[in-house]
Image: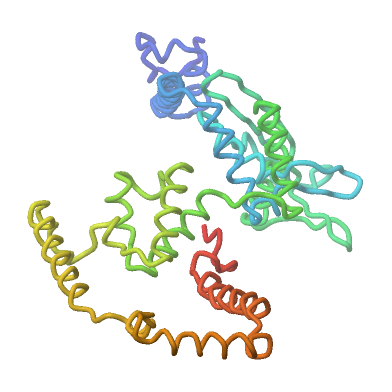
Amino acid sequence: MDNLPATIDHGAPVAHSPFARLAAHDGRNVGAVAIESDRAIAEAQGQLTLAKKFPRSMTAAIAEFTDTCNSPEFAATAFYSVPNRGSGPSIRFAEEAARCYGNFQYGHRELSRVPAGPGPHEYGRSEVEVFAWDMQNNNYSKRQVTVVHVRDTSHGPKKLTDQTDIDNRIANVASKQMRGRILALLPKHMVAIGQDVCKRTIAGGGETPLRERLIKMAAAFAKYGVNDKHLVAYLGHPVDDTTVDELGDLMGIYNALREGAKASDYFKLDGEAEVVDDSETAAAKAVVNKQQAAKSADKPVTAKKAEKPVHTAGNAAAAQQAAQTDSKPAQKVSKPEEEEPKEAAVEQAASVPETSQSPAATPEEKDVF
């Protein structure tokens, strides 16, 4: 210790630490090292405090992850398979699971690098640490690997000298190791649920994610002049926060719009007039009803009622002669037993097109979102 430079203040707390003395002996900036060390410690403590203050919800995490696994685009990247190396969940699957899990960090850092040189060190190499950290439970998993600066090709190993090629090589190796570190800390039932949902989605049996359904809902309502601002005013919160129950309510409104309802009955559209007072509305309805009653009173008697024959004593002889005439050719003139079913069939056939033309019954418009 007597060989330390005289510029070190032995009375300062930093100078008494072994790390600071070693740094000073190597000619490093002791102050910069101490500041960086304190900053890293303070950052880690702050992250742990936030994780404890805002704990995760396993129900919400699994629900969000399941919704993501219902996406065909994500499910297509959820698995990997390499000959002679095995198969399983991919790094993209692990990264998305960690994001939904919350209060979770992962990554890699390069600890040291040895440049290429003669002899056995023909290729350079880097010492890399891969880690995953569950900050809420304070579980930490890490692994150190050696990454040689070389790429295997069909013509043999190729030495890497470009900085970008070396960084890409390190990131490629580290990502494969990160997958194992992340999956080691995630709940096993959450990983199993995600794999099952992804497999069903790939097979075509998965449900549409809620986010995609919300996008389809907004596009469907836009046809009736209802935009995002109107939906937010109706829901009372952003459209992205819509729940499944609220989506079902909006589906009912959309079906009503398809059947002829007005969008202004549910949403306050731009330029819409103010709502009329209830008393004024009742008075207007009374006037309309009065006008309709007056029109119905002025309608003339129908021709069928006017042409109905009335049998009196004055025309008894004519009635008797008409009865004798009708009784003779009755079986040849009309066949009521056969005509009545035909008339009923015609009436039934005429009523079918009106029902089939209803907008709600169109098959291609069902389950829009």
Q: Is residue 239 above or below residue 9?
A: below
Task: Identify whether 107 is placed above or below 327.
Answer: above
Who's the residue at 64% across and 56% down the image?
73
Q: Can residue 30 be seen at all in this image of the molecule? A: no
Q: Is residue 150 visible?
A: yes
Lateral position of residue 301 relative to residue 365, left or right: left
Q: How many marks?
A: 0
Nearest to the observer: residue 221 or residue 175: 221
Q: Quadrant of residue 204?
A: bottom right
Residue toward you, 162 or 344: 344
Residue at 55% across, 78% down: 350
Report the side of 58 relative to 262 (left or right).
right
Rendered view: 117 above or below 349: above
Q: Where is residue 40 drawn, in percent x and y?
A: 45, 26
Name the one closer to the observer, 164 or 92: 92
The x and y percentages for residue 112 are: 64, 36
In the depicted view, which residue is nearer to us: 209 or 338? 338
Q: According to the image, what is the colour scheme of the structure?
A: rainbow
Snapshot quadrant of residue 195: top right
